Image (cartoon, rainbow, N blue to C red):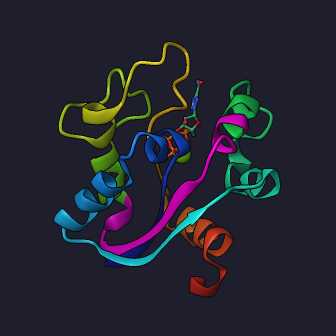
Amino acid sequence: MTQRTLILVKPDGVKRGLAGEVLRRIEAKGYTLAGVELKQATEALLEKHYEEHVGKPFYQPLVEFMLSGPVLAIVAEGERVIEGFRSLAGTTDPTTAAPGTIRGDLGRDFGLKVQQNIVHGSDSVESAEREIALWFPHLAS
Ligand code: RTP
Ligand code: MG
């Protein structure tokens, strides 16, 4: 099943010069790039992007972090890419993410700042559609 997913290289990844490394891993896995753009997020966009987290204790720090610099927004395409990219990214906390994954190999331990985990990837077909429409309106299906 060919899918599309929305990937973000978060501000920590862009600042550390890891955007190219993330793109390299996406392409090396065999996925196709359908959209790539450096963007400055806004509070309104993030409120929609992270709608399932609004009101959680980590929401406000997460938004502030996501506003702290540009993100590289990517639409990647391929067979089961939604699940496949989540697997490439590794689990949420970089400290315990498996070696071989983006977060496991490149994530730094920032103490409690688990939000600084380099990448975001859509977690379902529905989220991917919603997030692609938010970040790349012209690519929305
Ligand atoms: P993402 O959405 O960024 O791909 O990451 P995820 O699915 O692995 O994590 P999710 O549960 O959706 O959380 C979204 C982002 O919020 C930050 N976070 N901080 N306890 C905390 O301080 C905490 N928990 C989550 C992370 O940046 C996470 O990626
Ligand atoms: Mg998530």
**65 or 112, which is in the foreground?**
65
At horizontal 64% and vertical 75% (from top left) the residue drawn is 133
Q: Which quadrant of the render holds ligand 1? A: top right
**Residue 82 lies in quadrant:** bottom left
Q: Is residue 127 above or below residue 76?
A: above
In this view of the protein, can residue 141 be seen by the observer? no
Q: Is residue 76 above or below residue 24?
A: below
95 inside magenta stretch: no
Q: Is residue 34 left or right of residue 99?
A: right
At horizontal 60% and vertical 53% (from top left) the residue drawn is 70
Tell how many labels: 0
Q: Is residue 10 above or below residue 129?
A: above
The residues colored magenta run 64-82
Q: Is residue 54 left or right of residue 91?
A: right
Q: Is residue 46 above or below residue 39?
A: above
In this view of the protein, can residue 83 be seen by the observer? yes
At horizontal 17% and vertical 64% (from top left) the residue drawn is 28
73 inside magenta stretch: yes
Q: Quadrant of the N terminus?
A: bottom left
